[in-house]
Image (spheres, rainbow, N blue to C red):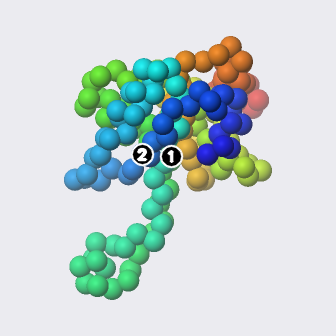
Amino acid sequence: MNAIGVCGLQLYRYGETVSIPFFTDTWRPDSFYEKIQRNRSLGLHTLCLLDIRVKEPSLESLCRGKKKYEPPRYMTIHTAIEQLLEVEQMRGESAYNEETTCVGFARLGSEDQKVVAGSMRELLAVDFGTPLHCLVIVGETHPVEEEMLDFYSLKSELSER
């Protein structure tokens, strides 16, 4: 959790961390929404930990009592943003929107880590590559934090190419 400090957002300006679970056809939990809303009302950043499904028993194996596991799944930033926007559309309480600034992280701490700042809409266009991913929804920022967000912005990434 401390590795997210690499993006330059001040760690003491983070609110409660949330987990974003994979949605299914019949299960679309949104309990994280209130925590994000509360953090944003206080001007705090929100670290979103994205779902990891490893060694999950298949429905068939649960019914038959045999040990058979689903293949591993790791939530991407794209999936998280799509689900976040779906919940916002359902709730309509304006906790965030597709223009809300976020920071996407992939493979933090590895040599090929990727950190990109931009709006939710902009981050949907970024290829973050292989897992693990996490996301920060940015709250109110200090000028030093804004400089770091500019450094990691999508515009900076495009100019490097």
Image quadrant occupied by the C terminus:
top right
Determine contact: label 1, label 2, CB under 8 Å.
yes
Say which amino acid is labelled 2.
Ile
Query: Which residue in the rendered view is the most extreme toward the top?
Result: 143
Q: Could you tell me how far apart the alpha carbons at marks 1 and 2 are, in whole angstroms?
A: 6 Å
> What is the number of the mark on residue 76?
none
Is 155 positioned to the left or the right of 66 in the image?
right
Is 13 positioned to the left or the right of 78 in the image?
right
**Mark 1 vs mark 2: which is more N-terminal?**
2
Say which amino acid is labelled 1.
Leu
Is 37 positioned to the left or the right of 45 in the image?
left
- Residue at image position (71%, 24%) is 148
Q: Secondary structure at mark 2?
A: strand
The answer to whether residue 156 shows anywhere in this view is no
- Residue at image position (66%, 43%) is 2
Residue sitting nearer the eye, 18 or 64: 18
* Depicted 31 relative to depicted 21: above or below: above
Q: Secondary structure at mark 1?
A: strand
Q: Position of residue 157 (x, y in %)?
A: 70, 30
- Residue at image position (71%, 36%) is 6
Label 1 Cα neighbours within 10 Å, binned few <14 / some 14-19 / many ≥20 = many
* Depicted 93 relative to depicted 125: above or below: above
Label 2 Cα neighbours within 10 Å, binned few <14 / some 14-19 / many ≥20 = many
Q: Position of residue 27 (x, y in %)?
A: 25, 51
Q: Position of residue 117 (x, y in %)?
A: 61, 29
> What is the number of the mark on residue 20?
2
Residue at mark 1: 49
Image quadrant occupied by the N terminus:
top right
Residue sitting nearer the eye, 46 or 79: 46
